[in-house]
Image: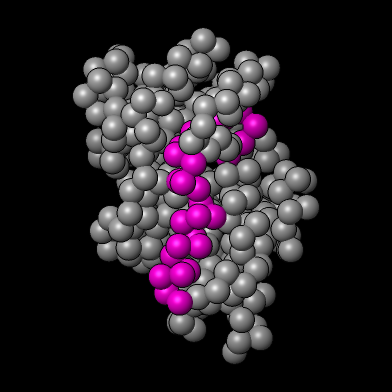
Amino acid sequence: MISLIAIDMDGTILNPDHSISQKNKQAILDAQSQGIEVVIATGRSYSEALIPVKEAGLKVPYICLNGAEVRDSSGELISATHIVESDIEKITSILDAEAIEYQLFIDTIVYTRDIESPLNAFIQLAREAGQNPPVEEIRKDIMKQVKLGTLQQIDSFDDLINQRGNEIYKIFGTSFNMPDLDKARKALQQIPGLAISSSGAGNLEITNINAQKGIAVEKLAKSKGLSMENVMAIGDNYNDLSMMERAGHSVAMGNAPDEIKAACTKVTTSNAEDGVGLAIEAILQPQN
């Protein structure tokens, strides 16, 4: 019997236009009405995750930044795990050497040197999944974050790192040059204490090794007296693997890479076809 459902956002619960469908919303509400805990587990910052969830009228706890931050359904911070400050310069030096653009995640704000970088990352994710990305809708979503101040463009990261280097949750690197990205990944993997994952072929998600979705989901389940055997994890990419491997019931989206599908107990339809809603409905039936 499923007691907790952990759901990824991009490529999973979010449609290509970054909204939550009515079917996905209703499935979550139905699960909650049966006493099942539903948590969003995303690589996004809390401020990025909150917008589509709030617009859908849902109230859930959040595992953000791949597990670097956990918040309750009211947005109150429960736990925070930052990258060790002494590792920041090592990371940025590797990314700079390979000309990989990156973003810094501090508190609820994402800092970028190029406002087009997050847009290109989302477009790349959609195309990788074989979808035609609604560019203008994604751009509107990004500009909404800019207006709210949760996405900020700055000329240089130097002062920010000097002043707040101990507050960085995640560094997100993107590149269309796969050999350079692979070279950077291999170099980063040599730094002890880091978790290197990705939410798509064209990016790197860098966090503290203790900041992973699977670790955060397991801690959340334990705090509620739940076994991981009774947890369902739904996702579409490599940064979801840590929770898929720990959960008793794992579901890959239809748009997930074959390696992710092979690691899961079930495969649902794509994020453009209400895959999350269908997966949840399937486990609710026996519990009615």
User: Where is the N terminus found, in terms of image quarters?
Assistant: bottom right
Residue 210 is inside the magenta segment:
yes
Residue 223 is inside the magenta segment:
yes
**Direction from residue 193 to residue 152 in the image, left or right:** left
Tell me where residue 64 appears, x and y as whole percent.
Answer: 41, 49
Tell me where residue 148 appears, x and y as whole percent.
Answer: 25, 39
Q: Is residue 150 above or below residue 227?
A: above
Of all residues, the one furthest to the left in this rendering is: 163
**Direction from residue 282 to residue 89 in the image, left or right:** left
State the residue in front, 225 or 56. Answer: 225
Rendering quarter of residue 86: top left
User: Where is the C terminus found, in terms of image quarters?
Assistant: bottom right
State the residue in front, 72 or 216. Answer: 216
Q: Residue, x 54% and y 55% (percent of image)?
A: 214
State the residue in front, 170 or 219. Answer: 219
State the residue in front, 111 or 243. Answer: 243
Q: Residue, x 50% and y 48% (percent of image)?
A: 212
Q: Residue, x 37% and y 29% (percent of image)?
A: 104
Q: In this view, does 192 lie above or below 23?
A: above
Magenta span of residues: 199-225
Tell me where residue 269 appears, x and y as whole percent.
Answer: 70, 58
Tell me where residue 164 appears, x and y as whole percent.
Answer: 24, 28
**Direction from residue 148 to residue 129 in the image, left or right:** right
Q: Is residue 20 above or below residue 205?
A: below
Of all residues, the one furthest to the front in this rendering is: 192
